[in-house]
Amino acid sequence: MGRPTRAPGRLARYGFGTAEGDGGARAADLLGPEGLRLWRPDEQEPVDEAAAELLAALSRAADPDLALRQLHRIVEAEGRTIEGSAGSPLLADVHNDPGLRRRLIAVLGASAALGDHLVAHPEHYQALRTAPDGLAPIAEGRLEPADGGNAVAALRTAYRLALLRIAAADLTGGRGLEQTMAALSALADATLSAAYEIAVAELAEGTERPRLAVVAMGKCGGGELNYVSDVDVIFVAAEDADLSAATLVATRLIYICGLVAWPVDAALRPEGSRGPLVRTLASHLAYYRRWARTWEFQALLKARPAAGDLPLAQEWIDQLAPLVWRAAERPEAVEDVRAMRRRIIDHIPPKELEREIKRGPGGLRDIEFAVQLLQLVHGRGDETLRPPGTIPALRALVAGGYVGRADGEALLRGYRFLRSVEHRLQLQGLRRTHTVPAEPGALRWLAAALGFTAAPGRSAVESFRAEWVTHATEVRRLHAKLLYRPLLESVARVPADGLRLTPEAARNRLEILGFADPAGALRHLQALTGGVSRTAAIQRTLLPVLLSEFADAPEPDRGLLNYRKVSDKLGSTPWYLRLLRDGGPVARRLARVLALSRYVADLLARDPEALRLLAEENELAPRAPGVLREGFLAAAARHTDPVEATSAVRALRRRELVRVACADVLCRAGALAPSPTRADGANRPARGLSDITEVGTALADVTDATLAAALRAAQASQPAPAGLRFAVIGMGRLGGYESNYLSDADVLFVYDPPPGTSESAASAAAHAVAEELRRLLGVPAPDPPLGVDADLRPEGRQGPLVRSLAAYAQYYARWSRVWEAQALLRARFVCGDADLGAEFEAMIEPVRYPADGLSREQVVEIRRIKARVETERLPRGADPATHTKLGRGGLADVEWAVQLVQLRHAGAIPSLRGTRTLDALAAAREAGLVDPADAAEMAAGWSLAAQVRNALMLVRGRAGDQLPRHGVELAGVARLLGRDDPGEFLDEYLRTGRRSRAAAERVLNAGA
């Protein structure tokens, strides 16, 4: 009695009893002498070799217990229809036909519903027999005629047989996912056609056959139907005379298909369920031209003739196609698609959200919406992007360069995985579901059905979950990347004709966009987009948008030329075009800076990789002074040769100039403007470039760091007495944190000899360091030069380049004149020995901030010098009304007025002691020394002049102080500063300058 009781344990090795939890006891009953007679309980082994093969096949099923139960039920049902005691024909066929055995067991283990169908119709297993030629049964979705007087019942039988063959091919690897979806879609077409003919045949005698088209939509239209789904359709009648009969046929078709296979859903028709079931072609066109919303055009991407009058269906699609491919040009179109996706997620019950593989985040809808939005936007100009299926469309997007190869492959893998999961879930019970089960047994079955097996340390379910999470996470990331790609709105705004860069269309568009030399611009376009390479394809995607951006600039031709130069240098690098296509606002930002700023274009031509800065908001924020100094010093320390060390520093300076200049150009560019956040993660804006003082500070910080690193290299290369202290003092615009893009570094060099060292030796060593510093920063190189100007030193160019602290103190005490005290108002320590710098600043305090202010003679001297400078230094032929530095109400007017106030009153009022012009002006106003209205006019005049001076440098790429009264440079400056009308901007500048001049003269002449 003992041996039979161990049979269940032996059967458990075949996988039986896992789901039942009985160790195989139930399987022993079904396989034993009272069941299928495949198992000898006493010997605990199969009855013969054929039985062993069948048991092995059952063990490989997704659910061996389910497959065995269904097989037993089918054999029982078969036995009830066979007379006598003959054996089971099914078992005999299964033993003799390995292909049948594999297909049947796979179906029985994966689909309880199809197993139930075979129990009800045991003879239908024969549909899975191997053909005489050794091939598997055809599983392409064909309907084979079935016997029976009732047409609907016969259609249902034929449908189930076709579905059985498709499922068997799918489960045994005879068909891949795409072939399975195509077969299911073909089966849907055949079923719709058969139901259509049944419905037409049921029309009352004498009724003329209507011209009615059934257009497949949704997954069926895309050729990607799953096992259980509503089949979306739209019904189209040819004429009004067809409507009555066509409506009867459509209504009956829906009813028949519901009985045979699946619900037919016509809710995608105009006006949805509130609208008529059938409309004429003309009525459809009228609706879509006037009333259709974006999602309705999005749905039409999947439209495909399915049944009925196929030529009419194709005519309907062809007539609507122009409307579909113009839908993305609506201002709200892109956001409509995004909003629809968000609404779908919002309607998922919270408890199902994480298990939803279709509608949930990282699910099939994420892929479909991303692909469809890209089709709507880019398919207007590229007809290769118009296939209705998701997989063919995604492949076309990758081939055309609209989606990166890696991103496209990740989406394809995710789509295949999620659709496979959906298929297995639906096949089990032939019911509509997209939710991964939470119950452990159901999860084990699903993992097994998908081919996951246990591995050391990980169960099959854990392996399934890990892959699911991987795909869902990647799909979610790519969905956000593609669906919310800023370039989409820009492409959508380009008319469809502008996307087709044929020579004739391109020439016409270039003329419309205002290119001065359309022929030359066309040559650039042909060079960038010629050929069939992937690079050319991506350029064809980008250029319509970039051309629109270039056209917004005063010189579109220059923007395109600069873009070609950058592309010629970087076009072969793998990241360049990918960054422009996928990197958020990078493409439009690049177009703006290239079109508006020759200065930035020149920098990018030398360092094209710097355009990566445009991709990250925080990369367009000026670096903190400490970060800059540390980085520059570290770069110099990597080299022992001083020239190489300084070259590394100058390269870093170039990158920082690109950073600041790009941020400056973009800060008034609306949606393109950078919005950096603090490095500490706080949700607050970081230091930006919203006004001219921030630009000046950022540029001065870069110069400070450059001088510090170059000084370190110079000191390392020049022998000096131990203990020699050396410092660099910033003067002029550097000292006032008011640097511009092409400013030299105005400095003083100061040293302090160590005890016991002769003055001559210390002076020579300090002089060598200063000369080496200037030489290193002046070595010819592709990087922007930084001139080091020490002309503000005592005695100017006739005086020694370097002085000791004591010598400076002696000079200022005995020989200093009032203009030298004025120059010292901006003096501050920059680099070198910090203690020496502080001692220098303390030494000059009484000189620049005299305790008793200025004498009447000194005030008169300052006014005289200002008048002479204004007369002698204003270039011949310059327009004093628009000269930003020396012109009326410009930089010099305001600075001389403020500095005079500082010299007269800073000795008594400490708040006036600062090197920044606007800070000192604000302090003078607060102290009651300057009328608030005058202070406001002077601040406005100084700020606008400084902005214009910087803008001139950015636009021209070279220094310039004269604002033109007309032409492209005036237009460029106005555009750069956020003004639309150059003439109005010029009037604003002249008006602001007049008011600033008047206020400055009142301050200069106060107390006269």
Image: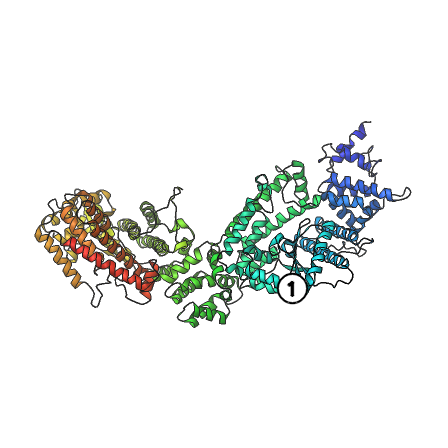
Measuring from the top left, give residue 728's x and y in whole percent. 23, 49
Position of 765 compared to 163: left or right?
A: left
682 is higher (above) or lower (below) than 863: above
Q: Quadrant of the N terminus?
A: top right
* Residue bearing mark 1: 314
Measuring from the top left, give residue 916's x and y in whole percent. 23, 49
Position of 608 compared to 531: left or right?
A: left
Q: How is the image coloured?
A: rainbow
Position of 943 compared to 197: left or right?
A: left
Q: Place residue 909 in its image quadrant.
A: top left
Q: Can residue 361 be seen in the rendering of this structure?
A: no
Q: Foreground: 487 or 633?
A: 487
Q: Foreground: 164 or 136?
A: 164
Q: Secondary structure at mark 1?
A: helix
Measuring from the top left, give residue 176's x and y in whole percent. 67, 53
Q: Foreground: 777 or 561?
A: 561
Q: Residue at x 72, y 37 (%)?
A: 15
Circle count? 1
Q: Outermost residue, right direction?
A: 84
Q: Outermost residue, top direction?
A: 1
Q: Can residue 738 be seen in the rendering of this structure?
A: yes
- Amino acid bearing label 1: Gln
Measuring from the top left, give residue 811's x and y in whole percent. 12, 50
Q: Place residue 60 in its image quadrant.
A: top right
Position of 502 compared to 132: left or right?
A: left
Within-10-Å neighbours for mark 1: few <14, some 14–19, many 20+? some
775 is higher (above) or lower (below) than 967: above
